[in-house]
Amino acid sequence: MSSVEPKHHIQPSSLPESLQAWRETDPLRNQRWAEPWEVLRPFFKAAGYELYRTKAVPGAFTVPISATPPALESFGLYGDRSNFVSSFSPFAQLFAARDRLNRDVVIKVISKGTEGANERRTLELLNSEPLRSDPANTTVPVLDFLEYEDYCFAVMPCCGSSSSYPFLYASECLDFAEQLLEALCFLHKHRIAHLDISFENVVVNHHGKMPKKYTYDQDRKGLKIWPPLEWRSTFPVRYYLLDFGISVHFPEDLPLSRCTILPFPQGRMHRAPETLGKKAFNPFAADVYQIARLLYAWFPDLANDVPDLLKLLQDMSYYNPSGRITASTALSRLRTLRTAIAEEKLTELRERNILHYLIIPRSNLRLLREILETGNWSLAGQYTWWLLKSWLSRILGKEKMN
């Protein structure tokens, strides 16, 4: 833990009154979104981190003060950084910087007093020994914790986005799925539930130039490059989880089945249905549901072509959380089914980008049974009524056609 005292004391009023106020500032609408960071620029510089500079255009990427490319050796990350121009998307809670060794880092404000203390405790646990040295710990490492008054900041390597380039082969998709489930198993083993698994919170061990997707003719018309250039197969790709802002942690000796929390307002559109209710729920089962939705959203064609994979995702997203399989069971089944997939299917070239979170398909009767198992009679009645109306509509439609 580092606590650096700046040369000039910063008035508390210069910073947001709460972590929530800082987090909710919209860089696309508020031109002054970066003011807290600018106020703290001397503080971070004293700690060895030169913040990127902002531009006058709302929503514009931030860029380094120096035009020098980042260091070739940067935390073991892969990528060509010669003549590479770094930039970072504007986020209220995150800001990019360069360290004393000319490496790109990201600084996140994680807590203010007790507000956000849960994320701070989780990150401190994940970055303590023996967890940090465990090869199964594929969470983004925290290089430094910095304290200014009652604010705490976490400094992390600047890793590439997992969604910055499409998946090209089924083998890449399955490798991604296996690594994500391995990461989840590690967290659950140590009784940490993430609760915010999404493509935005998965990064890759790469920072540098990306393959071009388009070329341009003499009229500057964009032409898609086909076949697409390789990327994930050009280095030993590893995926890392980050953002533990709404994570929860339980004692390691507590059985998973006994770990419950109350619903909370934050969450993604693909969050587990029980998180939207009023009763306490199991956050580990919710994690499994959310990762299943993420995997199906990214490569639905593969799941629909491989019945065992679709069945796995269905069991991971079982509507009744008590009927949902665990992360360790899901990982074991995924490893088994991978060995049965034909080589030609694994190496078939097909671009896969995440567009939206599709519902994992299952039969109407199966879904009705899963709803009934939860004891939600109101929802079961509504769903049954919808099924009857759909059935009558199809019957009447056929009669009109005849």
Image (cartoon, helix red, strand yellow):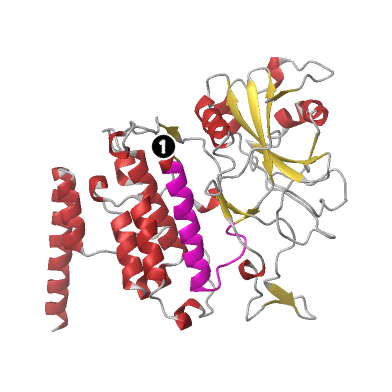
Give the vertical position of 27 relative to 166 (above or below): above
Q: Is residue 294 magenta?
A: no
Residue to which mark 1 is pinned: 191
Residue 259, quarter of the rendered image? top left
Q: Position of residue 385 (x, y in %)?
A: 14, 55
Q: Position of residue 200 (x, y in %)?
A: 55, 50
Which residue shows up at 71% across the image and 28% down it?
Answer: 36
Q: Front-most of 72 and 217?
A: 72
Which residue shows up at 81% across the image and 45% down it?
Answer: 64
**Predominant SS of the magenta segment:** helix
Which residue shows up at 61% across the image and 61% down it?
Answer: 237
Which residue shows up at 35% across the image and 67% down it?
Answer: 309
Residue 123, quarter of the rendered image? top right
Highlighted magenta segment, given as a residue range = 162-188
The residue carrying pointer 1 sits among few (fewer than 14), some (14 to 19) or many (20 or more) residues within 10 Å by Cα, namely many
Q: Is residue 168 magenta?
A: yes
